[in-house]
Amino acid sequence: MSDNILRFENISKTFPGVKALKNMSFEIHRGDVHVLLGENGAGKSTLIKILTGVYQADEGGTIYLNDEPVKIHDTLQSRKLGIGTVFQENSLIPHLNVAENVFLTRELRNTAGVIDWKRTYEECDKWIRELGVTHINPRTQVRKLSVADQQIVEIVKVFSQNPSIVILDEPTSSLSDNEINNLFRIIETLKEKGVTFIYVSHRMEEIKRIGDRATIFRDGALTGEIENCKTADMDQVINMIVGRTLDEKFPHRESHIGDVFFEVKDIQVPNTIYDISFQVRKGEVLGFSGLVGSGRTSTAKAIVGAIPRTSGEILIDGKPVKVTNPAEAIAHGIGYLPEDRKTEGLILTKSVKENISLPSLKKKFKKGIVIDAAKERGTAEEYREKLRIKTPSINRLSKFLSGGNQQKVVFAKWLCSEANIYIFDEPTRGIDVGAKSEIYQIINDLVSKGAAVIVISSELPEILGICDRIIVMRDGRITANIDRKDATQEKIMSYSI
């Protein structure tokens, strides 16, 4: 048997108007962590979906598993071949509990054929603790979990199936540093047992840390391979990914911070956040840092009325405003990019154009009782070009876009709304390295025009790179308010744990 557990030979995939993969050929070695790199829309997710039976490749290509050609017709066959997948967007059933999701379609039964619930919960708890997680109860309904905890459940579900190949698509995008460390520990343990990993990530620092070999995609074609991730030159890697160098990861910005424009006083959500108060000035980027579950996202949702608060006051330009639901937030010029783009940020059954224009229909595109279709189309095209959204048409349904391009559409709709206050919750999650720099530049442009911007991020380099001031949260409370000149990763972490 050769060192190759998988080999792709001339794999192509065509969608209407798009050649997503072009004669893709490469090998994956047994027991490696093989990293797939590329910008959003480069073809990584398409290849994964072919390997997992979601899509069928065009005629003429072959996948070899253990040197034998295989045709993968559906997801069930993929699992039977020993391929497990943690997708970037979760596939859990919200009304079922954690253990029911983990063992769905492979229930643990006793000799009478009845589900053995005691064993089910014990096994589920064992796998959760293997990940170093102690706060997730196997009996909790999935819909009550945060996005980060749902991602952990997805990982538990796949690992508990003892697969020979594990595909991890942006697995750390919702995880804290501690959870990432535990995940990498488990990956190394399973590697020693012969498990092979296909790892998709936009986080450059993870490539050297966990990767063995890598394949680089651009516009559906293979543009380079890395034989040793540990010794790779990251500048060269970035150049192969985006086709250009990124001279400055965090674009320089001259700070011209004005008067206090947005103020939050004593916001509370029972058992979630307590006495949250802060100010944001014109031209300022205020960062929110903290571990997953610290209350950052709940604070944002309470501000825009997405979850009810029991007390607290919001002031814009010194005047109290009523914000009890997202529509009122929009009316007051507050734009909110949510953490979970799939369920909260987009209407997946609507087009790119419709999603971009949605918050601004009344203000920008309505003429009497009709919509100015030409203006709506032109504006959507403008933001498509500005954010480099990869889609054959602005009329394409958002559900057909890659995860990163969906994120760009969410970003575009709030830029289109021309708000005065922006709350961006994990704005670069799932965004490739080239687009991240563009997103940072757009944030710079917003504050240069006097907007007040709040950025919630789990990436400390991002928080330190783009924010003027940083608020740290822990257990639903603010523990620190630090100027950028005084901020370090160590200081932020000390207030987070």
Image (tube, rainbow, N blue to C red):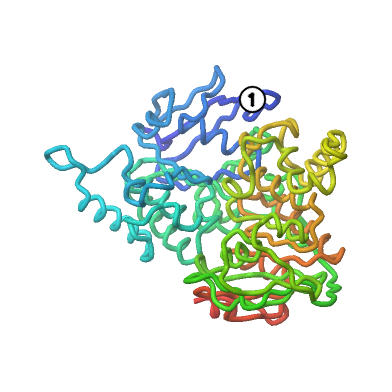
Q: Is residue 410 left or right of residue 475?
A: right
Residue annotated with mark 1: 15
| Vertical relation: 471 (above or below) 337 | below
Q: Is residue 489 visible?
A: no
Point 37% across, 47% down: residue? 96
Quadrant (top left/top right/bottom left/bottom right) for the N terminus: top left
Point 20% across, 53% down: residue? 118
What residue occupies the far left of the structure in this picture? 111
Q: Which of 167 and 260 is in front in this view?
A: 260
Q: Of helix, strand and loop, which one carries label 1? A: strand
Q: Is residue 214 visible?
A: yes
Q: How crowded is mark 1: few (under 14 residues within 10 Å), some or many (20 or more)?
A: few
Query: Residue 213 location in percent, x, y?
Result: 52, 46
Query: Residue 40 location in percent, x, y?
Result: 65, 43
| Vertical relation: 395 (above or below) 237 | above
Query: Residue 12 location in percent, x, y?
Result: 59, 25
Q: Which of 161 and 111 is in front in this view?
A: 111
| Vertical relation: 337 (above or below) 19 | below
Q: In this view, does 263 lie to the left or right of 112?
A: right
Point 85% across, 75% down: residue? 258
